[in-house]
Each structure stands twice: as C-alpha cells, then as structure tokens.
Image (cartoon, rainbow, N blue to C red):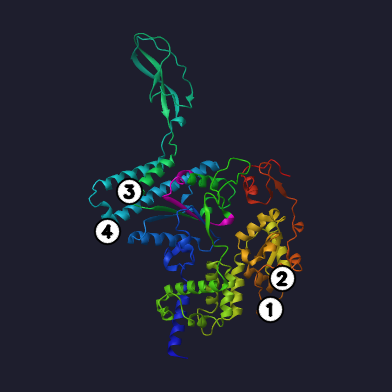
C-alpha cells in the first residue's frame, strides 16, 4: 500500500468523524452556496414569475432558496445583476394572542401584518447595506445629495404603513359621548338625534363635531353630545407596494424577489383558510407590479394556496395561473447516473468542509473527486448505489444513512464498507420515520401494500383512477411521511397512465418488510421500481379499495367532496378539507 493511499485514508477517517458534527439542516449552517450542488434549479428560479418549490422534508428547499438569495446578493454587489432577494420563513409570521380565540380570517391577516413589518425592516437593512457599498452607494448618490433623504423618507413611510395601516373613512365609527360644559347660549339649537354610532362617515361630520338639544338662553351649565371619531387602522398594503416600487426605481433594482420558505408553517395541517387567505393578501398586495416576484417553498402535502372554488368565493393563488411550479424536489428529473454523480459531489463537498486536506482527491479543483474517493469508502459501486437508492431523492436521508454507517464502523476505514452494513443502516434509519395512526385509513392502505409487496417482491403498486379519490387522503398522508413515493412520468407506460396511478414503496421500508418476512437481506434483489403494462402483473399489484373500511365517509354538501371522517380537518375542526366549510351532509 502506498504512502499516499494511507494518508488519503487517514484524512478520510478524520473527515468522517468531523462530518457527523455538521448540521443536516441548511438553516443551521446558513452557508448555502458552500453546500449547494446545482443541477439547474437556480436558473429556473431566476425569472420574475411567481414560482413554487415543492419538496418534502429534507429534499433541499431551504438550501435552494438560500443559495438563490446568496447568489443574487453576490451578483448585486458585483454589479452583474440588479436583482435583490429577501428571505423569510413562515415560522416568523406566526403571532398568537394568549387567552383569546381568534378566527382564521383575523389570524391570517395578523400573520400577513407581521410579514409586512418584517419586510419593511429587512428592506431597510438591505438598502443600508447597498448605500454603504462603495460600488453601489457612491455611484447612486454621487451628485444627488437629497436623494438619500428621499430614500429615508420612503423607508420611514413603508415602516409606518406596514405596522399600523392607513385609516379608511368608510370603516370609521363616530360614537356619542356626553360632556358637561359652561356656555353662553342664546341661539336656537336643534336635536340631531345622534345616538349610538354611525357606520359610514357623512361629509358634514368632523372630528369633535357637536350637536345640542332644545332651545336655551343665558349662561348656564348644560350637557352636549360630542361626536368622537374611532378609526381603527385598516391595512392598506397596496400603498406599501407603491412605496416599495418607488424605492426600487430610485435604487435601480430590476426585481425584488420575496423568498418565503416553510410556507406550511402558517398552518401545518392545511385544514384552515389561513394559507389561502395569506396567499390572497400576497396577490392583492404585490401581483400588480412586475418589479416584485414571490418565490414560495413548501411541502406539497401540507400546502393550500387557494380554497379551490369549493362552493364559495374563490380566493388565494391558483397554481398554473397566478403562480407556477418551478421545481418539484419530490419528482427528480435526474437520471440514475446523474443521481450517482449528484450525491457523490454533495458528499465530497461536505467532507471537504470537515477536512480541507481532502482536496488531494480534486486535482482539477472543480469540486468533483476522482475515483479514489468512493473506492476508499465503499467496497464496490453497487454498495454506493445502494446508499443512493435508499435516499429516495431526499438528500437529508442520504446523509443520515451515511452518518449511521460511519458510526457503526467507528468512523474507520480499516476495510471498505459492504452492502450488508449499508442495508442495516438503511433499515435502522427507516424505523425512526415510521409514525402512522394505527388502524387509520393510511394504515389499512399500507398493510395491503405490504402484503402485495412482500409476496410479489416488487415495490410498485397501482391504484385505479376511479378509486383514487376515495383513498387520496390516505395516499397523501403516506407520501407526506415519505413511506411511499410517486413514480416519475417516464417510468409509467402511457397505456397504464390512462387507467391507473402508479406508486412505489420506500426502499428502506421495503427492505424492513423483506427482512421481517424472513428473507436474507444479502440475497434480496430490489426491482427497478418502474411500472409495467403487463396485464398479467397489474391486477396482482393493484389496491382493492373494497378491503378498506369506507363506512366512515363524509360528503360535503357545499362542494360534494367525499372524504373519510379521519381526515385531519374534519377531526380537528369539523370542516371539509376542500372548501373549509362545515359539511351539512355527514352521511
């Protein structure tokens, strides 16, 4: 064994140990570009359209939005781009009063008010940074002494309006109060019969307007009615947009990108109208300007952008019309070879951060390691491919399994890792993710899939399109929990796409099932997880909804949507998951 190889193995072992300390979540390290491996997704997000990034937990949504913000910031500083990006998360908008039950509509408006306040603050900070930069600030302010004062006035106005809103006369109330005064009164006064409060403000009423009753003469003590204006601050977010656009024009910013991560944090159950209301306020406030673009990242199975016109007034953002899916991290378009390359590059970059001397594997300095890198860790390409397969397109899971294997080997590379140890780590990691309601509809579906999958030794199963709406809630729950996954379109024969939905069981879960069924894992061979159009196979791998208890179904009288009583929105709030209204027909 050469001395160079021994040194390389030693550096790798150091990196394995240090790598276990690196955060798996991007919001923990916030060095987005340093960890980011681009496969073209950044370019897809650079446009001015309103865009969505879908992805379940661990797929890289935060890393992608963070990398976009960092790259645009660097380009803005260098003068190669005039786009500004501001990053937010849904968790930052949640503000709840204590001891008070707040309607969803009020809560949604409250969350949006917090967002607007945060926007004003971060916009002000970004402008301060820009004006303080030699390349940008000096060029913009040269010979324009009053421009900075104008910018400061606009920022102050944005801050004030975002916090308190602007009063609207039509919503003002004038309430009567009696006040004892001493007055000389020798003129006729008429009783205007002003009692209670007035909902709409007449032009003749002024703040503090007074009206008396009866005819009085002489200097005497008397009571008068005093009209007092009570004008709550009604948010006027469109006015904020106008000020923001004015500011962008002055600063010569082409597009302001508002990056909203963790959208589902607004309501993780997606059972209320909060998310659609927040989306509606976004649309009303910002959609009128081509200079402002909104990019949202969220879990598809916990996201509701609109009420889907479910028997009531439509509100929110319509996907495909108001906002478009730019990246779906749950449905990777990478080929198998591209996935191998992606995970190798991602792993090498993280280990290189842990141990900089691993650059000995990168003679070309392109962040792509040579062949020695993987060969020192895994005993074969197949073993490495097994690890990639177990990730199911979820980078965080790949890293969790990798760290579990390293820990099992005490972070040593006395000999390369074998496929048996990889599979043991896959099953161990998978067991941590098994959280599903016992005897729930999702549990019944999964049990049926398990029986078919272990008997047929295939991870693929089918659901007839006619039956899919009946169990769509259970399917979504299993998808959200990453126990099953959607097949990409190219893996489903056209003939099958017309009649069936095709899905696959998570690889780690399938291995666990196979082991529990008494199979030797060393001899288990996974299928390619592609759908078939063989009529001799499909019937034996198709879900029978008749075997799932459907007696507890609810049909909504508002939108005719049918759903099980176990649906979270109905269990938690007694409302339909489609239109957010209480179903009148509980049949």
Separation of residues labelled 2 and 4 (CA atoms): 66 Å
Separation of residues labelled 3 and 4 (CA atoms): 17 Å
Which element is circle 4 on?
helix
The residue identified by callout 1 is 520
Query: Which one is nearer the viewer's eye here, 107 or 485?
Result: 485
Circle on res. 454 = 2
The residue identified by callout 3 is 250
State which mark lies toward you, 4 or 1.
4
Which element is circle 3 on?
helix
Q: In the rendering, at what x and y percent does residue 422 appear?
A: 58, 76
Q: Is residue 401 visible?
A: yes
Query: Which residue occupies 47% across, 67% down?
Result: 38
Separation of residues labelled 4 and 1 (CA atoms): 66 Å
The residue identified by callout 4 is 134
Which element is circle 2 on?
helix
Q: Is residue 440 visible?
A: no
Please say if 404 is above or below 445.
below
* Cβ atoms under marks 3 and 1 closer than 8 Å: no
**Sequence-first tag of 4 and 1:** 4
Query: Which one is nearer the viewer's eye here, 527 or 523?
Result: 527
Which element is circle 1 on?
loop
Residue 294 magenta-highlighted:
yes
């Amino acid at each position: 064994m050469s001395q160079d190889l021994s040194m390389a193995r030693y550096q790798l072992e150091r990196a394995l140990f240090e790598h276990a300390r690196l955060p798996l979540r991007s919001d923990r390290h916030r060095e987005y570009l340093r960890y980011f491996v681009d496969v073209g997704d950044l370019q897809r997000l650079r446009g001015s359209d309103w865009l969505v990034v879908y992805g379940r937990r661990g797929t890289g949504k935060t890393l992608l939005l963070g990398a976009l913000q960092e790259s645009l910031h660097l380009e803005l500083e260098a003068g190669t781009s005039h786009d500004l990006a501001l990053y937010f998360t849904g968790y930052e908008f949640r503000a709840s009063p204590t001891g008070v039950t707040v309607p969803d509509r009020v809560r949604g408006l409250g969350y949006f008010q917090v967002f607007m306040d945060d926007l004003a603050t971060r916009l002000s900070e970004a402008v301060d940074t820009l004006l303080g930069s030699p390349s940008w600030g000096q060029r913009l302010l040269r010979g324009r002494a009053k421009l900075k004062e104008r910018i400061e006035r606009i920022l102050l106005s944005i801050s004030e309006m975002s916090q308190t809103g602007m009063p609207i006369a039509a919503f003002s109330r004038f309430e009567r109060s009696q006040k004892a005064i001493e007055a000389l009164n020798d003129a006729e006064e008429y009783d205007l019969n002003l009692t209670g409060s007035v909902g709409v403000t007449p032009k003749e009423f002024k703040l503090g307007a007074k009206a008396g009753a009866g005819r009085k003469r002489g200097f005497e003590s008397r009571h008068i009615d005093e009209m007092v204006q009570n004008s709550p601050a009604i948010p006027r977010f469109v006015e904020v947009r106008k000020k923001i656009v004015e500011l962008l024009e002055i600063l010569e910013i082409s597009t302001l990108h508002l990056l909203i991560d963790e959208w589902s944090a607004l309501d993780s159950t997606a059972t209320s109208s909060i998310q659609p209301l927040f989306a509606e306020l976004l649309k009303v406030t910002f959609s009128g300007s081509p200079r402002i673009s909104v990019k949202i990242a969220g879990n598809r199975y916990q996201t509701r952008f609109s009420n889907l016109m479910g028997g009531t007034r439509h509100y929110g953002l319509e996907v495909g019309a108001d906002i478009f899916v730019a990246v779906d991290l749950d449905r990777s378009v990478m080929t198998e070879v591209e996935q191998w390359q992606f995970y190798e590059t991602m792993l090498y970059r993280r280990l290189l951060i842990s141990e900089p001397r691993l650059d000995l594997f990168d003679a070309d300095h392109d962040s792509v390691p040579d062949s020695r890198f993987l060969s020192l860790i895994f005993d074969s390409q197949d073993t490495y491919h097994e690890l990639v397969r177990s990730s199911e397109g979820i980078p965080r899971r790949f890293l969790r399994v990798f760290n579990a294997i390293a820990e099992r080997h005490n972070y040593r590379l006395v000999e390369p890792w074998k496929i048996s140890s990889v599979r043991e780590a896959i099953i161990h990691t998978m067991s941590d993710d098994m959280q599903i309601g016992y005897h729930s509809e999702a549990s019944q579906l999964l049990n049926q899939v398990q029986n078919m999958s272990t008997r047929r030794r295939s991870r693929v199963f089918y659901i007839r399109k006619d039956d899919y709406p009946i169990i769509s809630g259970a399917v979504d729950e299993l998808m959200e929990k990453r126990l099953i996954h959607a097949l990409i379109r190219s893996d489903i024969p056209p003939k099958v796409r017309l009649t069936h939905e095709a899905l696959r069981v998570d690889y780690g879960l399938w291995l666990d099932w196979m082991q529990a069924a008494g199979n030797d894992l060393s001899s288990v061979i996974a299928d390619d997880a592609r759908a078939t159009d063989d009529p001799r196979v499909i019937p034996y791998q198709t879900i029978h909804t008749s075997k799932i208890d459907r007696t507890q179904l609810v049909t909504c009288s508002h939108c005719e949507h049918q759903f099980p009583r176990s649906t979270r929105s109905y269990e938690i709030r007694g409302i339909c998951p489609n239109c957010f209204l209480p179903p009148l027909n509980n049949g």
